Amino acid sequence: MYRRRQKWLLLGLCAYCGGTKEDARKYCCHNCTSRQTESARTKRNKRKNLGLCCRCDCEAIGNVKYCMKHWVEAVCHKYFGRTINCDIATQKLIQQNFKCYYSGLKLTPGVNASADHKWPKIRYPKRKADVSNMVWCDIHINYMKRDLTEYEFINMCKTIVNFQRRKK
Ligand SMILES: [Zn+2]
Ligand SMILES: [Zn+2]
């Protein structure tokens, strides 16, 4: 099987069916590409309908298509730009007692738990992959904070509260 594929590849043919390839740089022909995409989609949908993680046979959590382990992995991937420090990230969530770092709101994995760069990555790119810069917080709080530092964000919240009090 492997040998046959190698031979076809060397001959510039589709590795799956041995037919002509439309794009010489690709591994297989258009037909085989779409067949593969289709079968992958069917598999994914099947898992989704069963409420399973799209990466393994564990049950999916919250509103996401991942189990706990693969959800943390996906969060870390997005956060660090690659999949690293997943165990540390999980430990942090436990250490925070599943509570938002800024608001104390309850965090539910796969629902409202999100990873935040305390020192925003846009302004402090060097701290993007710094694990000590990672905290878990409520997703809406994360949107509100955006590129503010912790100090700026808390001050902003105080400004809002004070202004609203004066209005009454
Ligand atoms: Zn083919
Ligand atoms: Zn999984």
Image (tube, rainbow, N blue to C red):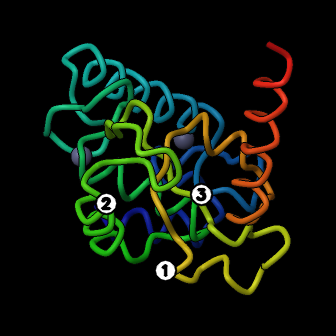
| Circle 2: element type | loop
Crowding at dot 3, Cα within 10 Å, few <14 / some 14-19 / many 20+, comes out as: some
- Mark closest to the chain's N terminus, 2 or 3: 3
Give me the C-alpha separation between circle 3 and circle 1: 38 Å
Labels 3, 1: front one: 1
**Contact, mark 2 vs mark 3 (Cβ under 8 Å):** no
64 w.r.t. 131: above or below: above
Which residue is identified by label 1? 131
* Pick the front one: 44 or 37: 44
- What residue appears at the point 72 percent right and 49 percent down from the top-left corner? 145
Q: Which residue lies under the disc numbered 3? A: 27
Residue 66 coordinates in the image, percent (x, y): 32, 39
Above or below, 158 relative to 135: above
Residue under numbered circle 2: 96
* Residue depicted at x 55% and y 38%: 139
Rendering coords of residue 109 (x, y %): 32, 40
| Near-viewer residue (57 or 163) | 163
Residue 93 is situated, as x and y percent measured from the top left of the image, at: 31, 59
| Residue 47 in the image, given as x and y percentages of width and height | 25, 25
Locate the C terminus and report the quarter of the image it occupies. top right
Is the residue 8 above or below the residue 3 in the image? above
Mark 1 vs mark 2: give the one in front: 2
Amino acid type, label 2: Gln
**The N terminus appears in which quarter of the rendering?**
bottom left
Report the disc number at residue 70: none
